Image (cartoon, coloured by chain):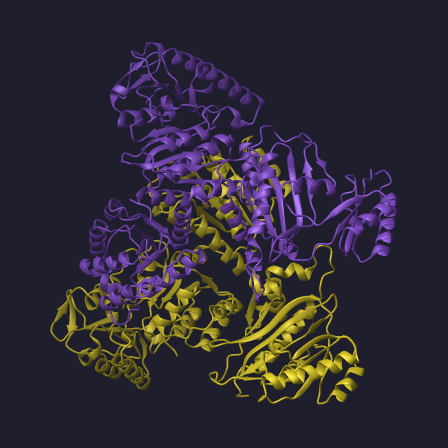
Chain colours: A purple, B yellow
Amino acid sequence: MNIDKLMKPRKICIVGASEKEGFGGDTCRNVISHMDENRYFLVNPKRNTIFGKKAYPSVSDVPEDFDLAVICTPASSVEQILRDAAARGARGAVVYASGYKEVGTAEGLAAQESLKELCDKLDIALMGPNCAGYINYIDAIYPFAFISEERDRTGSIGFVSQSGQLCLSMMDNLTPKFSFSISAGNCAITEMEDYIDFLVDDEFTKVIAVYLEGAKNPTKLADSFRKAAFKRKPVVVLKTGKSEKGCKLAVSHTGSLAGSDKAYDAFFKKFGVIRVDDLEELIYTAHLFATLKELPKHAGFASISLSGGETGICADVASAFGVEFPDFAPDTTAKLRVMLPSYASPANPLDATATLSYNAERFAACLRVLVQDEAVATVLLGYTLLQKIADPAIRYMAEAIKTVSEENGAKPMIMVSFAGNTRNEEYKTILESCGVPILPPTLYAFKILRYLADFIGYDYRDHDLSLAIPSRPCRETRQALSEHAAKEVVARYGIPFPKEAIAQSIEEAKELARGMAYPLAAKIDSTDILHKSDIGCVKLNIRDEAELEAAYGEILANALEHRPEACIGGVNVQEMAKAGVEMIVGVTGTPQFGPAVLVGMGGVFVEVFEDTALALAPLSREEARNLILSLKGTKLLTGYRGSAPCDLEAIVDVLLAISKMASDRKDDLVELDMNPVFVYERGVCAVDAVLVSDGGA
Amino acid sequence: MNIDKLMKPRKICIVGASEKEGFGGDTCRNVISHMDENRYFLVNPKRNTIFGKKAYPSVSDVPEDFDLAVICTPASSVEQILRDAAARGARGAVVYASGYKEVGTAEGLAAQESLKELCDKLDIALMGPNCAGYINYIDAIYPFAFISEERDRTGSIGFVSQSGQLCLSMMDNLTPKFSFSISAGNCAITEMEDYIDFLVDDEFTKVIAVYLEGAKNPTKLADSFRKAAFKRKPVVVLKTGKSEKGCKLAVSHTGSLAGSDKAYDAFFKKFGVIRVDDLEELIYTAHLFATLKELPKHAGFASISLSGGETGICADVASAFGVEFPDFAPDTTAKLRVMLPSYASPANPLDATATLSYNAERFAACLRVLVQDEAVATVLLGYTLLQKIADPAIRYMAEAIKTVSEENGAKPMIMVSFAGNTRNEEYKTILESCGVPILPPTLYAFKILRYLADFIGYDYRDHDLSLAIPSRPCRETRQALSEHAAKEVVARYGIPFPKEAIAQSIEEAKELARGMAYPLAAKIDSTDILHKSDIGCVKLNIRDEAELEAAYGEILANALEHRPEACIGGVNVQEMAKAGVEMIVGVTGTPQFGPAVLVGMGGVFVEVFEDTALALAPLSREEARNLILSLKGTKLLTGYRGSAPCDLEAIVDVLLAISKMASDRKDDLVELDMNPVFVYERGVCAVDAVLVSDGGA
């Protein structure tokens, strides 16, 4: 959907313009204060002027055609206004009115459907209904239902929110500066995906901040995220639902597909989208990217604070978030030793003591030394900028920061605060104009710096950015293959299993066993019997032909006794795999994003420590390897207590094979579970496989 | 040390009083602005008046005796002034001057030692040197070296900081209100422990906030913490050094004993002291306790926000910190359903939608319903109070909050913000006077609420609050017992081991074996051979007498070959313990707090997942049990995959026995390591023991 007429209209028409409090009045106040008067028309049948500007009795009386209708009137009047506006060339509309899907009634739903059909017919990109509109700060377009501050907020954050309240909270904050700020409402016609795509394309938008309730059109969303990844344009998303209660809320509030929150995580991770946990993180992560003049070259940070206590806090909190302070080069240490008082230790993080901060030249010299160290890509300035400046230190520091930021070889600098409040506007502006964002106190600051480090470390070339999104919804039916049949399917993708075959008689079993190496296992082969061992239909460690014969008989007898109605394919005779490091590998279908490949350390590790990880298919080789290395129990594979390392590439191959299979069967595969897969010093062996489809292949 | 003369002087004397910028001038400005003029004297040899107040040429010219000398002059003059002040009755002194231990030179150290001796001789409690002084807000005493705000900051937080910078940052913050604020400096004479003890005793101090570099006098600190625990007075401590780099910094900055940071954690935990990670947490955790009129009765929270997005954030972030939103009682849900718009779901956390917030009566009614639910002990109000109020919602909400907070059966209410900034002073004051603190955004808020929940859950009766602090420093020497000797020591405390005995000959070995059950193990017995299995001196799974004979010979031969010089006690013949759930139990000495008991899941769990926990000896039964239950792998003990639960009380008994032993041997025990200890459905069995002492028993 092209939404340029909606988002970048040449002229707009406010229908329901007014001087009263409320949407119509506040929109007029915004428009009149901020917009070029040749770009808007006001419509009100009962007044000739509004705030001294001419008002027209109806849309058809407006003297020129326009692109965008801003409809401030109640739901009942909206459709007729849309028709009239379309006749005047409008291809965009903003509808504030509520009374649609959000009220949860049949009438509301019907009204929304009707609106949608009309917009399709009229070819109108509509924002809302039940929205607060938007501000285009770049072109000064203000169809927004709440009074916007006089202060210039123009910047490079493209913000779109599915929650009006969070949109207002973000805009009320004094820090972020926007290219666009969009309160998207019900997204009945123009969807979140359209806005995001628009912002990815928009040249004035440096970073995209999103409050997303759920993915409605995963393919479209993936397309936008892919484009952003290629452009290296950061996308920061607040999507709640990580917790059980949060997930329930997300579903009840939005009626969006629930799905596993882990699928969202995997989706965002694949495209390098930064997922944040609350509004403060959204504000400041976006602000960080918007303010930095260039991205750090790598994830090595230096920190400079004015006291030991502050430096200690930085060390501890950074460590908790895996933000790294590499050791300084010997040359750096030597230079710092000369600059600092005798009692200071020139280490990273650096306690520069307060003395340096009262002398711009000395502070600049110290910053220069940090910047010149190759291990350092970003300098963190630990300092609490207050609203009212009593201590003059910041004057000298700001001068030094400005000087150093303009020099050749300058590196990004970021201020980290130790207490939260509103910052002094003068120094905030000075620092921001040097490209130095001020982050909130350390818990937020280092979490956000972790996001920065992750973003720097993300390379789209390491990821397979195609997705295996199903072409049809999953059916309700479930069909499980027998173990043998499941293995046959999976083996075709190159997964090694122990030798096995189905025997229809005791003689055939013995004959098959002659081609195998004892010990053997024997199991019933039946799609009707899933929990085989519970009813004595699995015999392990069969050491010779005599034991095999006994086992065969017992298995059949048990099957007959416990499941007389089951259709029996025979007895599955298998070699026993030798034990290795136990892993589990599987596939699970996600309702939005297609199949996800799951891997975990097996046995007690998955049961007790829940040590599993998942990624969306298809996987690149890098993704598969990193998925395995992200497990807590990865030490079991890479060698510990002097044991030889396992064949990591062989288990990577298994994941890639499974990923291929999952992609091929995205439409019907519901679940694959291989548990255990043994990993050896060389090679792997899968021992079991359960495969469930929706029967629609 | 009684520091009442220092902290609550009747009269004080400012030596080095001045009108200039700097310590002397700023102290005078503070004192003159805030103090009763009958309570201070100004001394300056060169002036008759300072800011219009009389100045005396010397301490001896001051017309009355005084309790406290505030010395604003350089280090060189301090000792003579102390002598003069002592002669005028002073038993307290504040010394701002630097040039002591903090500079790290021999001269500085000597100056500090000399100062300490003098104070001992003169019986003077001295704050500093190298400090910024303090403010006693309760009695309006202002010997503080930086200008203090005019605004009344009197409250109930007793704050003491070993860092001047952090002290100033905390005081610069607009939120906390203090009984005392102390910048303690070098703590050469009056120690951190003295200030903390003073604040524990002080009736005006409701909560104690501390920035602590390290425990200098652990016994004294424990005494104060114990007293605070008995009084249920919250102590909130910021102590850096959790990370490797932070720990190094703490040591280099303060010269305090490093020790394991986990020992500090265990120390704080024993006494219910809240350990926070940064200054923002320190400020707001203290503010929370200071503002609440009573503590919540239990850890069940209800949350009410005005939008779905905010409610989702609360659900997710609370869950990340284990803050619990119990389900509402059916009655609550039914009442809410009537009050809320049709599209709202009456769940906890509650999205009350914005409509309620514009009507004080309806908002109050909703709060009342939440407060009446027994599952709810605290109501969280999700709302971002801005500095400038545009949206009138807060007017109605504040009215409702005030009404409900004054009713019978009122429960604590806490406001949680979604964006950080300075809050509107008017509404902040209204809310605080109702006992409603405003917390920073959710990452901080829910971390702090976790601390609150932990504090509510802490009961000193569950803990053994005595400590086994050694009476002498640990010696450098190390002495390891042989396995057999170590087991004998530990067995005396009731730890069960498999049957074993030392054989001096092959015949004796066979004779001993006749009284045991095969399979057996045989190991060399020698204090000189620690890594026995590496050189073939351990044989396991000996099935009969023939194998025993062979094993005996091989063990001796291997010992002779690899350690010809070793003193051999014989061959240790043991029954093999049957395998159970593998745990490790040990003791490790901490330099500050005496022995700590360590427990962990054994084998791969401790190696790969580092799943261990420690607590300071002696342990109460509750502490021992909770320590075990705090392990991630505790499911292995409590039963999983249908396996029977293990004998938890038996492993608790082992911990208590080890705790007793550790306490008895606090002076010489360096380390005890029992790995593995098998835990069975009934009982336990320890298989090995390594015991190292400093040889000084």
* Residue B513 seen anywhere in this rendered image of the structure: yes
Which quadrant of the figure contains the C terminus of chain B? bottom right
Q: Nearer the viewer, residue A581 or A238?
A: A581
| Residue B236 sits above or below residue A577 on the image | below
Where residue B237 appears, x then y in whole percent?
A: 43, 64
| Residue B506 sits above or below residue B583 on the image | below
How many callouts does the rendering have? 0
Where residue B302 appears, x then y in whole percent?
A: 54, 46
Compared across the picture, whether B581 is left or right of B274 comes to right
Which quadrant of the figure contains the N terminus of chain B? bottom left
Q: At x 26% / y 70%, what residue is drawn?
A: B39
Q: Nearer the viewer, residue B428 or A172?
A: A172
Where residue B571 appears, x then y in whole percent?
A: 69, 85
| Residue A427 sits above or below residue B683 on the image | above
> In the picture, residue B557 is in which quadrant?
bottom right
Q: At x 22% / y 80%, what residue is drawn?
A: B81
Compared across the picture, whether A693 is left or right of B510 comes to left
* Residue A274 seen anywhere in this rendered image of the structure: no
| Residue B318 sits above or below residue A467 on the image | below
Where residue A410 appears, x then y in whole percent?
A: 25, 51
Compared across the picture, whether B230 is left or right of B496 comes to left
Q: At x 52% / y 68%, what residue is drawn?
A: B266
